[in-house]
Amino acid sequence: MRLLGTQSDEQLAVRFWNYLESQKISSRLDRDADGFHIWVISEDDVDRAKAAYTDYLVDPKNEKFNAADKLTAELKRIRSEAEKKAKKANSRQRTLPWQTRQQNDIPVTILLIVISVTVSLLTSFGQSDSRLSRSLHINDGMLYRVTYQGEEVIDRVPVHTLPDITEKGQVWRLISPIFLHLSPMHLVFNMIMTFQFGSLIERRKGSLFILLQVLFVGVLSNLLQFYFTDPGFGGMSGVLYGFFGYVWMKGIVSPEEGLGADRQTVFVLLVWFVICMLSVGVANYAHAAGLFLGMFLGAAPGVYRGRKRFAR
């Protein structure tokens, strides 16, 4: 590092230092009792810097030094904005999502969690036979077609109709079972997955999109589960498998959209899907419906765009 010169006037020193910066000459400006010292960092730049400094001492008001002031100010502004963006991005990567994002940018995800927790507590995790609990199932009880021989029942066949919806107009029952959870562990696991996938989708695709996705997947998975079983099911799992299927397919078909699931997540959720299929008392039809509907929603747009490009 070589001392180029010393100025007693701060404005003159800063102005020439700005000129060096605009010429991409690495330099430093120090201050002490004797004034402002201008240093050149690299020996390779010393000769150029000396020539410029000589011109500056002769005519410090030369137009080329004025232009340097404006250019350096603009470069500093651009650099400052870039540093702020980098710091913000690094901060988001180091901290948890709820520490960097406000709740108002994922209102649907937060609402799903709040309603699920509230309903599960008020219904004692499905153990309560209260009016509230009965009103949230897809139908209040199962209807059966009974065949008698005399006074003896010889056949009892479940009738998969929904009179509470079709006759009484209680249309909320089509979606409300997703908020019923039958144990604390069931609730905690589902809410963690709701936050993980829901916040990801909502931030990328918007609140209206995820709301429509919840309604579409939730209603169809509830209807399929009821058709093959009875009204006693509940939980967000069908919707969550819909989220998972959507994100999984987006990462494969349309990775440019910034959605995707890592291999470990895919492996764990598919293994869990199979384990549930081999178990009883699990809403497997809802799981299956949610998974395949989500995969369809995630893959179809990308496949369609790909076919159009191929056709051209």
Image (spheres, helix red, strand yellow):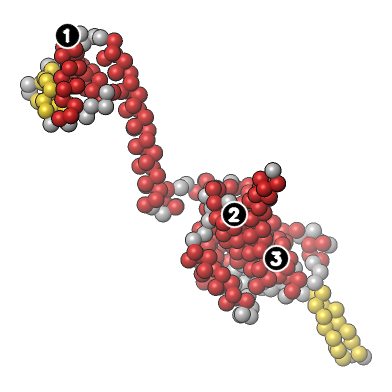
Q: CA distance from mark 1 to mark 2?
A: 66 Å
Disc 3, SS:
helix
Q: Earlier in the sequence, mark 2 or mark 3?
A: 3
Quadrant (top left, top right, bottom left, bottom right) of the C terminus: top right
Q: Amino acid at mark 2?
A: Val
- Please give the name of the residue rendered at 55% of the width and 55% of the height, measured from the top-left corner: 251
Residue 6's x, y, as percent?
A: 11, 20
Disc 1, SS:
helix
Q: CA distance from mark 2 to mark 3?
A: 28 Å
- Local packing at callout 2 (Cα closer than 10 Å; few below 14, some 14-19, many 20+) is some
- Please give the name of the residue rendered at 78% of the width and 62% of the height, measured from the top-left corner: 165
Q: Relative to residue 145, is residue 35 drawn left or right?
A: left
Q: Are marks 2 and 3 in contact (CB under 8 Å)?
A: no
Above/below status of 244 relative to 30: below
Q: Earlier in the sequence, mark 1 or mark 3?
A: 1
Q: Nearer the viewer, residue 196 or 123?
A: 196
Label disc, if present, on residue 222 of the rendered structure: 3
Disc 2, SS:
helix
Q: Are marks 1 and 3 in contact (CB under 8 Å)?
A: no
Above/below status of 285 relative to 90: below
Q: Amino acid at mark 1?
A: Val
Instruction: Name the residue that disc number 1 marks.
Output: 58
Confirm whether residue 127 shows in the render.
no
Residue 179 lies in quadrant: bottom right
